[in-house]
Amino acid sequence: MTMLSRVAERLFWMARYLERAEDTARLVHAYTHMVMDIPKGSEPGWDILVKILNAEPHYQAHYRVYNEQNVMKFLLADEGNISGILSAIRAARENVRTTRDVLPGEVWEHVNELYLYAQEYAEKSVGRRNRYHFLETVIARCQMVNGMVASTLQRGHAYRFIKLGQLLERADMTTRVIDVGAAALLGNERLHSTVDPLIWTSLCNSLSAMGAYRREFGPQVEASAMVDFVLREGALPRSVKFCLDGIRKELTPLKNNRDALKLVIKARRKLSLFDPQVSSREELHVFIDRFQLILTQLYTSIDHTWFMTDERQASGTLKASATR
Amino acid sequence: MNKSWSKYRADKFYDELIASSGRPRVAAKRVVNLLQTLSEDEMASRRAAAELAIREMGVSFTIYSEGKNIDRAWPFDIIPRVIPARDWARVSLGLAQRSRALNCFIDDIYNTQKILAAGIVPADVVLDSRNFKPQCVGMSPRFGAWAHICGTDLVRDQRGKFYVLEDNLRVPSGVSYMLENREITKRVLPELLENYSIQPVDDYPSRLHSMLASLSPRPVRRPCIAVLTPGIYNAAYFEHAFLAQRMGAELVEGSDLFVDDDDCVYMRTVDGPIRVDVVYRRIDDDFLDPEAFREDSALGVPGIMRAWKAGHVAIANAPGAGVADDKVVYAFVPDMIRYYLQEKPLLASVKTYLCMKKKDRDFVLANLDKLVVKPANESGGYGLMIGSHASAAKRGEFARLIEQNPRNYIAQPILALSTAPTYIDDSVEPRHLDLRPFILHGKETWVTPGGLTRVALAKGSLVVNSSQGGGSKDTWIVEGKR
């Protein structure tokens, strides 16, 4: 099966954007849920969400205050915000629109429907009343597309580059979710006993990992055990370890994969050497920052090896800059 | 029961479904009877279902307006057009005949030019045309086939007789909409199809694929076929992607291809360069190769003409095929049929006045209000004037244009185009339509059963182009009694 470099690039970004939309929806969903549980006065601010997604410059150019209304509008409905749900879905759709010939027909139909849905409801779902329903629908529809790809797409280059985009984005987002926890609790040490479990539970929920955690460790929520779990549990589909393993698997059959594989090995080593059980929140935050840098290098390597072919300018692929 | 059917009058035009008595034609009887039983609400809900299907399937076309590209949902009328198979058989033969003659003509023009020597077609008409490409002289593509894919526009007059309006031999589009229209009808009016035996249209992509594969310069079992598109902003991009997918071919843009020192065409892939055997190009000649045609074209592939001339790649339609896609040349097609095939033309052409001839020009200038004036080289319904609908100032403007450049204009009588019941707002009204069948020409010639029916949605309008507010209908060729 042949795969044009341009098409591979667009598939990769389609998958990244779909994953970004889903993961952002999961994050906002969990965060909203958590905020309602925490006693008034000690809840963490909404600015954390914007910071976690590295979107402050754009936010500050368009909004003054970090309140719930503004941050939700920014993350759900702002077409100018490339980290937002609506624009991620739009970008995913643009990339499918130009690659639909290599995808099962239903993939285009469903991504298109998702876009039409988001376009109509994102703005109306900024308030708490409709927010859950919107986020749940976005998550469900993204998963439907993933399911279609998983159950109907031939295991060839198209599938491979979709998986690479999806897993790279997911690894990135999972580290960001952990960072939310670390950041929310930094400088808030005195509230640990009451707030800690609430925050970690909701973040773990956003990764659909709570059930698995309970089966493994029992109902007591213990921060460092949980961080360890979502970072390094290779059997958990949204863990960073799982994503790296998957990336390595998809890279293996590709030609000229040496540089990219080296970076995956580097990332895996970093991950195995970091022990959340003995690290402070500050150290966790620093680790995540460094780890995200390796993920960025990995993207750059993929881009140089398979997408950027000489003489050709990146034509029409809708993508964000490598660092967000 | 829907009241608007009982008020339906086709006036003085030939109506495809309803005879002048007001009763349905035999072939259309069951369609009309069934639609009549649907209430206004039911009709509206079927239309809504069709619109939803179109949006979900993403069937769209792009128009360029006010400096922006807009992606429009494909306009579709849910009432199908029904043509008896026996009527169609003859039209189909006529189309195949025409395609054979046109291909003989193009091959002749780029080689011996005997039709010009024989004085059947005036040499200057052909050789001075901007569609004549000197770069193609001396080429003889396999099977003598140049116009591999042709979209011929047909209309019917007030007696229902079919006429050829024009042959589109450059990059004709619309075939994907023909396929999608059938798909939509199956989704929203499944009961209509129950009692009919309708000739299927959905084998078009596989027919196209075999024809393209037969052109491959390398004798390989699965030649590499690429559909070359100008990109997402082209009006017909939807179709390019659709056909590539249905054929299992690669959809490429100019920047995906390059010609190497060995004069072969390659595409850039994640596994490195892969040689391409056949390019189904949806880019006009002028933009195909900046080395051979327009230097400023960023859409094309530098060197692809070199590769084609070296016989290392097949291009469909062949570069230069547009020489026969000219409204002046059109007037000579019946002569070509007699000359190359020694056959009688099976399909009628519309009487055409060539403004380059003094006698014709005088007649045209004296009768501007009764004629349609068309530029010889435009498509998409642009730049034409329908005399009876035009203002005096507009007619004056065209008179000047004709005087200035008579070669570039032709005129034809205003045809009383046939109509068909079309669902407008909440009633059924007659609207004018045409038909674009597609003809594939390689070793053999094959014609689609039916084609794309385009409808002028504005009352009384004769302009069916989707870029100018036209709609479309599913077209059925049905077996059985007429």
Image (tube, coloured by chain):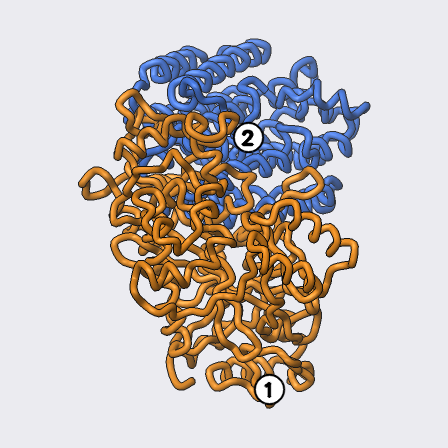
Image quadrant in which you'd find residue A39: top right
Q: Residue sitting at 78 percent across and 28 percent down?
A: A67
Image quadrant in which you'd find residue A319: top right
**For residue A257, above or below residue A73:** above
Say if residue B271 shows up in the picture: yes
Q: Quarter holding the N terminus of chain B? A: bottom right
Residue at which label 2 appears: A318
Image quadrant in which you'd find residue B18: bottom right
Residue B20: mark in rendering: 1
Amino acid type, mark 2: Leu
Q: Residue sitting at 50 percent across and 81 percent down?
A: B28
Q: Which chain is orange?
A: B
* Label 2 element class: loop
**For residue B194, above or below residue A280:** below
Q: Quarter holding the C terminus of chain B? A: bottom left
Contact, mark 1 vs mark 2 (Cβ under 8 Å): no
Give percent across and percent down for residue B307. 31, 30
Q: Chain of mark 2?
A: A
Q: CA distance from mark 1 to mark 2?
A: 56 Å
Give percent across and percent down for residue B406. 60, 49
Q: How many marks?
A: 2
Of residues B94 and B323, the one nearer the viewer is B323
* Label 1 element class: loop
Of residues B243 and A99, the one nearer the viewer is B243
